[in-house]
Image (cartoon, rainbow, N blue to C red):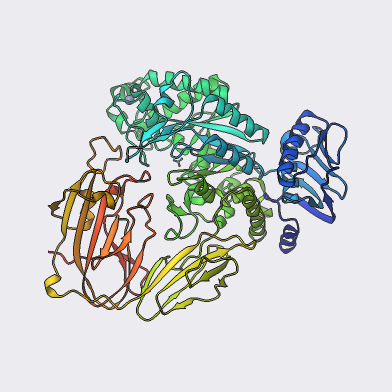
Amino acid sequence: MKILTALLAVALAGIIPEPVSLQQQNGKFTLTACSGFCAASPEAAQVAGLTASGLRASTGLKLPVKAGKGNIVLILDKESGIPFEGYSLKVGRNKVEARASSREGLFYAMQSFLQLLDGGRKAPCCEISDSPRFQWRGFHIDPCRHFLPVEEVKKQIDILSQYKVNRMHWHLTDDQGWRIEIKKYPKLTEVGAWRTEFDGSVYGGFYTQDEIRDVVAYAAERCVTVVPEIEMPGHAISAIRAYPELSCTGETMNTFYTWGTPDVSLCVGSERVFEFLDDVISEVVRLFPSEYIHIGGDECRKNRWETCPKCQARIKEQGIVADKEFTAEEKLQSYAVHRMEGILAKYGRKLIGWDEILEGGLSPNATVMSWRGEKGGVKAAMMGHAVIMTPGSEGMYFDHFQGDPKAEPTAIGHYTTLEKVYAYDPVPQVLKDAGKSSLVKGVQCNNWSEYIYDVSHREYMLFPRAFALAEIAWTQPDHKDWESFKTRVDAACRRLDARGVNYHVPLPEQPGGSCSNLAFSDKTVVELTTTRPEKIVYTLDGSEPTAESAEYKAPIEINRTSVLKTASVTSFGRLSTVRTINATKMEPLPGFADEDIFKGIRARRADGRFWNAAALEGAEWTPIDLKSFRDITALEPYDRNLPDSTRFFAVEAGACFKVKETGVYRFSSDCDRVWIDYNLLIDNSDEPVKRYSRHDAELVLAEGVHNVHLLYIFNIKGGWNPLRNKSEVSMRKPGSEEWKPIKIIEL
Ligand code: ACM
Ligand code: ZN
């Protein structure tokens, strides 16, 4: 049966998400210049119009929409008994008929039809009957860390709605930027929408209320409800930047330009703050018809509340006392979320928040978005609350790596492959066992954007994982089939190609850790694999690989200095990013003579704001004492709030280390630069962000004593604070996959 489905899927180019039932029949329907839409109701005509304009773009055909005539018939039949959002679709040789009880159902029928046409003019004859598993099939976007212009927001809505995703969670406010115009508080966007980066440049942007109305209407046409998120009481530095009186101390803050959570939150002891939140929400509800408004609630640091007279007075006034489960401040957050629920209720809206809103007691009608695993979602559902599953640990965070971190562009961490996303079932077994499955209203992928510096990379992180999200959100679990899905993903990726949208193709990776700078004395062997099976091609003559280049069949033996260029190739000929692996033949670097060996660390420091290694020219250096390389990050206190008084600096440090056997050693570091025996080996200094270095490199070292020298710069690039890095160099011994910090010869 599974094989049959897979074969059928090939023949049909494949629909994502997989429908409830699909029967292929003989023959094909062909679009011609004589085709047209027949749509009697205004809802059907709207869907037909949208479909016609899509077909005009893909085929050039300009098909009319008429009330009583046309061979593509859209019937809105409220008595049909078809579930909300469900549809039936009959594709015959001469006629297509879509039937649904809702506009949404007709829209989804047309999305299936468009996928059957697959960009061409012919669709295989078939009968489909379909309806979704979950009502909330969501994707989240984060324009706060990196701004996403309106056109890009619309593009994502357009593409994802084609896969029957129907909620866009728009994360509009955060420490790094306030992105929604609020008329009563103009400084939120005049000031709070902008941040000054380390290099002095000003970064930001915001959506005007007109732009938001435009996006909401655009989404509604495509059956996507836009759910805005206004973060409280944490993640609110951009608001506090604009209106300092919203914090406990009234201190002046910069809009945050690093990632992570600062200590400063909204002062929930202050009535002024609730007045502000009420005012903001009163404008938000006029822009967003969504039944739900997301109030954030995650990662709120409460240390200022502990010493704030107003917050402590509120605790007293409310009779809040700590117990075994929750601190008084956690309960104070719960008080604040309850107040938000009241504000929303006043405007006829419901509250949704991240799972921290469980801490200190859940508001009576709140819906919980479970992101820290499924725990919060399970707890809330057991209490009878609706939940949306978005657990990062189960594959719903698309800011995770989707391949080897040593080969992929920098991501926030973790590991979420397409297969992992696809494997996720949003209803945990405990809820099934407890008869609470129906409280899981849906599932959502979160696309946090700290490490997403451009549109193409955003698409790379989103696709094809979003296709897996679409299928787990719509398709019943017994209908999921990974083999068939992979084939259908290829078809969906071809459609992205046609539209010029980027996506992830698994890279050739080296088992045990990718490394693009290999060294050897006699020969080295390069083994390659991919996270899901794809053909791998390569060249050894320096030329760019193509789909027709030599196919990788077995580990490649290299015995002279070579440049290996490799890429994977999809079934339809699309290449992944090319990986260039330099393999250098060398004599072992000899150990140092006694007079060149020294004990301990020789180090010097320069104070100032240095953008990169080149900016150090002319710097004033002062010798410093260091016991270990690790101590470099302790030279200045790590303060997550990054106050203006922060002292930035650079350090150069060198030491000797002993190598017990001659062989190939591999080095890794997040420092700006690393030299081994005075050869520059690793250079991260001009990377957009100094995290998860992809510049690991090998050298052949002879038994004896060698030198390691590093450059560490404390600056902020790409929002990352390198005081959080390890200021050291790690090494792998010959034949080992275990990384260990280089052990220097101490004083
Ligand atoms: C979250 O990822 N902080 C909800
Ligand atoms: Zn306070």
Q: Residue 180: x and y, percent?
A: 49, 28
- Determine whether, in the image, residue 162 is placed left or right of residue 235: right
The residue lying at 32 percent from left, 61 percent from top is 682
Near-viewer residue (569 or 227): 569
On the question of residue 412 being in view, the answer is yes
Residue 399, image x, y percentages: 48, 48
Within the displayed image, which quadrant is ligand 1 positioned in? top left
**In this picture, residue 328 sits left or right of residue 98:** left
| Number of numbered discs on residues | 0
Closer to the camera, 676 or 640?
Answer: 676
x then y, percent, for residue 205: 46, 32
Vertical comparison of 584 with 282: above or below: below
Question: Could you tell me which quadrant the C terminus lies in?
Answer: bottom left
Q: Which quadrant, please, contains the N terminus?
A: bottom right
Of 290 and 515, which appears nearest the observer? 515
Q: Farthest bottom residue?
A: 522
Instruction: Decide: is 482 above or below 39.
Output: below
Examine the image and state in which quarter residue 409 appears: bottom left
